[in-house]
Image (tube, rainbow, N blue to C red):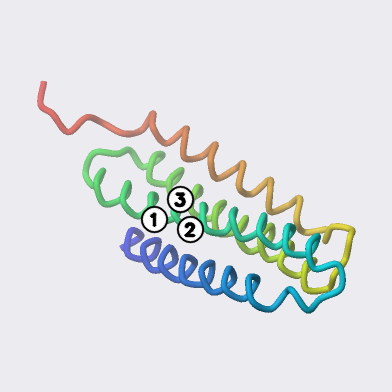
Amino acid sequence: MACRLWLFLAGLSGFLAVLAASFGAHRLASLPNAAAVTAIWQTGNQFHLVHSLALLLIAALLTASEGRRSALASWLLNLAGFGFLAGIVLFSGGVYLQSLRGAPAGIPIVPAGGLSFLAGWAALALSAFGLRSGRAG
């Protein structure tokens, strides 16, 4: 069940990342200091797209390891997904908002999003210790 949720969220997030890239490429040129704003937007979009793929990885790992992972590994994989999702919302969303406002200073939620990404990657790494080989013997 969790793998379907993460697959749905990965697809939705990837869709929104491509939509945001298109918006940024076509609509930010009219803003004051467009070059700086576009560069900031692209950073948020890059992190958004990469972590959309990371959500897809979570769905794939949950599916591939069914019956071969500990409860801790399941919890850590889901925690990684939540970390990636929170990072997308807080970091990328904050960067998008900063760009739209044309603000040179960061939005306070952006660092929390970065920490969420880090927590997600750490949880993913630790989940490896709860996976068992699929081969007998």
Residue located at (59% from left, 53% from top)? 47
Residue located at (68% from left, 66% from top)? 93
Query: In the image, what residue type sits under mark 1?
Result: Leu
**Picture coordinates of residue 85, whole percent (x, y):** 55, 59
**Picture coordinates of residue 56, whole percent (x, y):** 39, 55
Q: Residues within 10 Å of mark 1 (few under 14, many from 20)?
A: many
Residue located at (33% from left, 58% from top)? 3
Outermost residue on the left side: it is: 136
Q: Is residue 13 left or right of residue 103?
A: left
Q: Residues within 10 Å of mark 3 (few under 14, many from 20)?
A: many
- Residue at label 2? 52
Instruction: State if disc 3 and disc 1 touch (CB < 8 Å).
Output: yes
Disc 2 is placed on an element classified as: helix
Disc 1 is placed on an element classified as: helix
The front one of 117 and 132 is 117
Marks 2 and 1, how far apart at CA: 7 Å
Residue located at (17% from left, 33% from top)? 134
Disc 3 is placed on an element classified as: helix
- Residue at label 1? 56
Query: In the image, what residue type sits under mark 2?
Result: Ser
| Quadrant of the rendered image containing residue 59 | bottom left
**Picture coordinates of residue 71, whole percent (x, y):** 36, 42
Q: Is residue 121 left or right of residue 32?
A: left
Query: Relative to 43, is 69 above or below?
Result: above
Instruction: State if disc 3 and disc 2 touch (CB < 8 Å).
Output: yes
Instruction: State if disc 1 and disc 2 touch (CB < 8 Å).
Output: yes
- Residue at label 3? 54
Marks 1 and 3, how far apart at CA: 5 Å
The front one of 95 and 130 is 95
Q: Quadrant of the N terminus?
A: bottom left
